[in-house]
Image: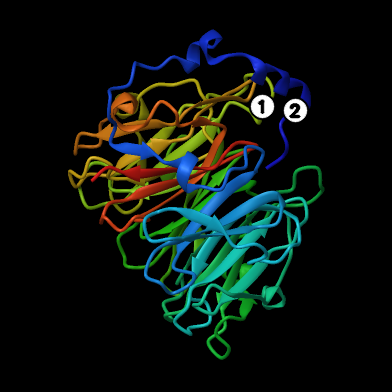
Amino acid sequence: MRRPTPSSLLFTALSCASITACAAPTPPATTLFTDVTATHVPADAELHALDAALLDADGDGDLDVAVAVENGANRLYLNDGAGKLSQTPGAFGSIAGDNEHVRVADFNGDGHLDVVFVAEDTEQHNLFLGDGKGGFTRVSERLPATSQANAVAVGDVNGDGLPDIVVGNTTEGKEGVAQPFLWLNDRARPGWFIDASISHLPAIDVQAQGIVLADLDGDGDLDMAIASQDPINRLLLNDGGGRFTDATDRLGKQVPTETREVHALDANGDGRLDLVFFNLTSNNRDWDKDPQTRLLINQGNARFKDETRTRLPTHRFSSWGGTVVDFNHDGHPDLVVSAIDVPGFVPLQVRAWQNDGKGNFSDVTAKVIPAATVGRSWSMARGDLDGDGKQDLFIGGWQSQARLLLSRP
């Protein structure tokens, strides 16, 4: 991410009471999530924890947290089994980078989860192999290229049983084309990667900020949706062998957006995956594009219709991230959305939107999210951190305390 305009940060001194977008209903005594940040997450109010991924790094049966840190060393937080996190210094080395996103998978097939980070300004992506005991070895030479990247996704795109890597690139401040990368896991040497970008991807220029791999056309392989800051979001369809064609026209007419993340979910319960895009008005500059979150409903065969107006709450805050989670345990996917008031980069309360089971979402923030869960919230990771069988949320932040919400029993 490009740093916010320094002059606009002066607005962060304003109290939420003076910002209309900060207003929220008085919360009930209890909410579906409990904010345990103060007791369960290492304190660092200035940390740029832009993304996180959950994995059992030390083999003790609970989920730990790998954190992508902008302008710092990436972090590993180990879990005590009840959701209390502690930092393991130097787990991913001490090299500071402009780290944007992180994903995990067993890349080398040894039964232990590994971690890949992508970076923007420092243009150095890093791959770490896990030993299953909390230790990681840097093997970044196995990645075939460097770039200015803002997005990463992992999944088996060619059906060989090995996880591959897709990297979304940008060219802010540079000449050239922002071509995504597709790195196929080498069958002869699992955990090494072959650059198949030219042979397997269409030649496109997309300023990628987020990527999701999901079976969007129902043919059993992983397709690709790309969130772009400019000019339009993209849809690529997989032929089953990891070769993608540009099918962006199937997204329908797009409202101009500066999109930061895209997620796949079956919003209306028809068995087809829909797409939700989280957007900004600008990267903390003037009011520019409409930051309204967009929901595109799959009409079949990966042909989408924008049904935002009738299905989502309207809003004017910007959102750098969010997640899909069934927070009320009714079997339908709900949405948790980060919120920042722009211009001004003012921290806001994280939002919760409940699905009625038919793909219509209503704002239930006061019933779900504690009033204390305020920050410049970024990307989120979900999983059962305290072992109660329910999904919890680790919420990243930009120069803002990373937060942990545990689902109530």
Name the one closer to the observer, 107 or 303: 107
Q: CA distance from mark 2 to mark 1?
A: 6 Å
For residue 134, say whether it is visible. yes
Type of the residue with mark 2 = Thr
Which residue is labeled 1 in the image? 284
As helix, strand or loop, the secondary structure at mark 1 comes to loop
Which quarter of the figure has residue 222?
bottom left
Q: Is residue 78 above or below residue 193?
A: above
Viewer-side residue, 124 vs 53 = 53
Q: Are marks 2 and 1 in contact (CB under 8 Å)?
A: yes
Position of residue 2 measured from the top left corner of the image (x, y, whole percent): 72, 39
Q: Amino acid at mark 1?
A: Asn
Q: Position of residue 80 (x, y in %)?
A: 43, 60
The residue that disc 2 covers is 5
Q: Earlier in the sequence, mark 2 or mark 1?
A: 2
In the image, taking residue 280 as reference, residue 308 lies left or right, namely left
Task: Kindly state the secondary structure of the residue where label 2 is placed.
Answer: loop
Which label belongs to residue 151?
A: none
Residue positioned 42% across, 33% down in the render = 294
Q: Residue 389: x and y, percent?
A: 25, 56
**Is 131 left, or right, of 120 in this rendering?**
left
Q: Circle 2: is it few (<14), some (14-19), or many (20+) Cα within 10 Å?
A: some
